[in-house]
Amino acid sequence: MVREFTYRGEIFRVIAHGTPGHEEVFIQHMEDGEEMGEISIDRMTEENDTSAPIDVICVELCDRLIIEREINAKAKDDPEAAFTWNDTKQKIAFQVHNGLQEQESDLAAAPGVSGI
């Protein structure tokens, strides 16, 4: 999944793949359409609440990124500047694979591809 959101008046992009609670999650701070600072977590191997929804993980990572990169958040103390998805017509900008690999039989059916 690739999706943008606003938090504390700043725009961020999340790139997450894997199954819920066990994703690799990357957060990028966006400034004038450019990718700035980045932070990530591998929810399969790093300590975290695997029952937490992705938006909660995004907020936790953003809070860390804001401190680490000394981002002067526009709405740092504004309670109205809570996490919100920047939705357009679609909620998800891009769907990324679920982390499962294709089986050998699937690969053998593709022209010019040999099995594993």
Image: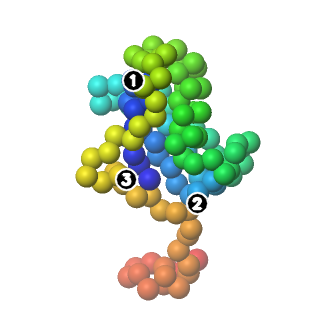
* Residue 19 spot, x, y in % from top left: 58, 60
Q: Where is residue 115 in the image (x, y as percent from the top left)?
A: 54, 80
Which numbered tag is attached to residue 26? none
Answer yes or no: is residue 89 visible. yes
Q: Residue 52: horizontal and vertical position, in percent?
A: 63, 47
Query: Which residue in the protein does label 1 denote?
Result: 9
| Placement of 65 over or under 90, stated as above or below | above
**Which numbered disc covers residue 19?**
2
Q: Residue at x 56, y 68 (%)?
A: 100
In this view, the mark in front (1 or 3): 1
Asked whether disc 1 touches disc 3, contact meaning CB atoms under 8 Å apart, the reply is no
Could you tell me which secondary element the residue under label 2 belongs to?
loop
* 48 or 26: nearer the viewer: 48
Q: Residue 83 at what x, y percent from top left?
A: 46, 34
Query: Is residue 3 toward the left or the right of residue 77 in the image?
Result: left
Q: How far apart are marks 3 and 2 (CA)?
A: 16 Å
Number of callouts: 3
Q: Tell me the residue that label 3 is attached to.
A: 92
Circle 3 packing at 10 Å, graded few (<14), some (14-19), many (20+), is some
Residue at 64 percent of width and 54 percent of height? 22
Front one among 35 and 20: 20
How packed mark 2 is, by other alpha carbons closer than 10 Å (few <14, some 14-19, many 20 or more), is: some
In the image, is residue 71 above or below residue 63?
A: above
Earlier in the chain: of badge 3 and badge 2, it is 2
Residue kind at label 1, given as amino acid type: Gly
Assign the C terminus to one quadrant of the image.
Answer: bottom right
**Placement of 17 over or under 55, stated as above or below:** below
Residue 39 at least partly seen: no
The residue type indicated by label 3 comes to: Ile
